[in-house]
Amino acid sequence: MQNHRLVIISLIGIFILSMGCIDLRSFPLLPSLTCPVDCSDGLPCTQDICSQDTEYRCQHLPINGEVNMCSGDVDECHMKTCNKGMCVTDLKQYCAYGVECEDFNVISPAYEFYKSINQLPSFACSVTNIGKQQGSIQITSEVEGYSNEFEKSVSLRPGESKDVGINLVYDDEFYDLPDARSAILKTKMVSGAYTLYSDSKSVQIEKSSVFSPNLGDEGLIAMWVTYNDPCIEEIISEAKKFTPSKQFVGYLGDEDTMYWELAAIFYSLYYQDIKYVSSTFTSTNVAEAMYNQDIRFPYRSLKYKQMNCIDGAVLYAAILEKLDYQTGIAFIPGHAFVLVRDFDGSWIPIETTMTGDDISSFDDAVYSGYDSMQDPDLFIIDVHAAIESGITPMPLGGNHECNVDDLTEEATAYQEYLSQSGSQSGNSGDCYDVDYGYMTDGACSYDKAAYCQDGLVYWAIHEECGSVYPNCIDTDYGLVYNGYCSSDSQAYCENGVMYWASYGECG
């Protein structure tokens, strides 16, 4: 239509000129029919045009992208490019990401295993695409010498952010570290050939024995109950020698068989000569952690012939869980002991520290456990329920020493007691003592230091056996037997007098 208008105007002009009526110099309103010689505005990012379509006027259209006069790298991450008609410095897409990773400076083998079985990441990084195009990055991470190399590719739209979980998988040896150590954690993110993020830092790996759960996570103690360890099988083989039937039937039996099976486990550990090492629980942060305690794996208690209260509790629990008994661990201030679920659902406590005190019987351990159950601050972790919920033992591998002694001789003497007592229930009036062997009801030991009454062995504190043994009665510790130390190893009894253990008498 515009072209038609120009043609009509031109024809009118020619007609007027032919009539000689008008001087064109006095008629400036007619448009020029040619473009200027130079339409350039001097800007590299505009397209300068003039044509009949622009009515022979110069126009400057903005250009986006690289052109001859606005292109090339400024540095590794920036380049020159046109944007809406202006030459600007823009971020290259492979550099156009923001990265932020969580602090991961202390690594706990226990919690790393918990994360792995629950498919939780070791730590996470947040990645954001701050560019104008869709892109992807590749992420790698590893703890050198202890984990595999994690690899993952992540795609991001412009403006999109993603939290990327770094799931590290560790070697079995990582879960059995005897001491804390340093390692190097490497994390790297690349886009194409460009490295977006690279971090190589020293981290602290805790020894695998550290148990410091957050409140509500106490069931993680089940990770130390390594019932599938070959060492547990070895001690069960020795414990079978102490049972009346030379086998374990668990809950398929009755209360009597359960009594003798629990006793068999007690004596099989007692005769391994495992010594009790005094240790108490401490808390590093009462608001966040219930306990902070080293726990030996069961095989370590067997191998090194020593344990404290919590070590003994997890050792007993591992044996009992392997035999399909349901277990728990009871906590009172500064102390722990194992529990076994009875047929009626109640708990049977066993004071595991008596396994290594040289004087106590299985019955003593049970009665002591019942006394501890009266503590008003009693707290119970249902280990079996924790295992059923998916908390499994940490992997240890099979290449470790168990150091389980052959107890055939000791078990034979114990079996003689069972046959002489004429009973395989826990209700016989006769006694079996770890030091004195079989004792009939009412009889004294050969050294007149102890006597048997209704199936229990008592110290002859008064004159039941014709002699007075010089034990001690202390206002703080109560009864302490002659030659033995107090419960906290701070004092000892000698000929009826208590002394402070200042010269190592109690280790």
Image: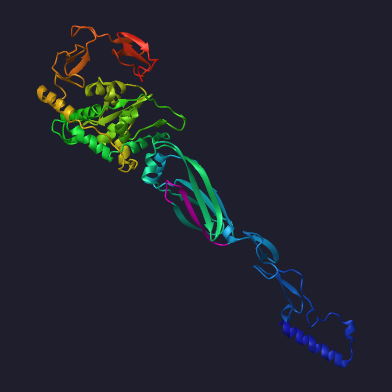
In the displayed structure image, the side of residue 158 where residue 266 appears, left or right: left
Q: Position of residue 250 (x, y in %)?
A: 19, 35
Can residue 325 be seen here? The reply is no
Query: Which residue is at the front of the view, 73 or 357?
Result: 357
Quick check: 15 above or below 366?
below
Quarter of the image holding residue 448? top left
Q: Residue furthest bottom?
A: 18
In the displayed structure image, the side of residue 101 where residue 112 appears, left or right: left
Colouring scheme, one of rainbow, by chain, secondary structure, one colour:
rainbow
Query: Which residue is at the front of the view, 62 or 406?
Result: 406
Residue drawn at (30%, 16%) of the image? 484
Span colored in magenta: 133-148
Quarter of the image holding residue 80? bottom right
Query: Which residue is at the front of the view, 483 or 97?
Result: 483
Residue drawn at (13%, 33%) of the image? 245
In the displayed structure image, the side of residue 231 where residue 499 appears, left or right: right
Q: Number of callouts in the render?
A: 0
Q: Position of residue 13 (x, y in %)?
A: 82, 88
Quick check: 66 above or below 125?
below
Query: Which residue is at the front of the view, 399 or 438?
Result: 399
Instruction: Inspect the magenta stretch and tell me whether residue 273 lies in it.
Output: no
Can residue 432 be seen here? The reply is yes
Which quadrant is home to the C terminus? Answer: top left
Quarter of the image holding residue 83? bottom right
Q: Position of residue 48 (x, y in %)?
A: 73, 74
Which quadrant is home to the N terminus? Answer: bottom right
Q: Position of residue 268 (x, y in %)?
A: 22, 29
Instruction: Inspect the magenta stretch and tell me whether residue 141 lies in it.
Output: yes
Residue drawn at (89%, 89%) of the image? 21
In the displayed structure image, the side of residue 39 where residue 304 appears, left or right: left
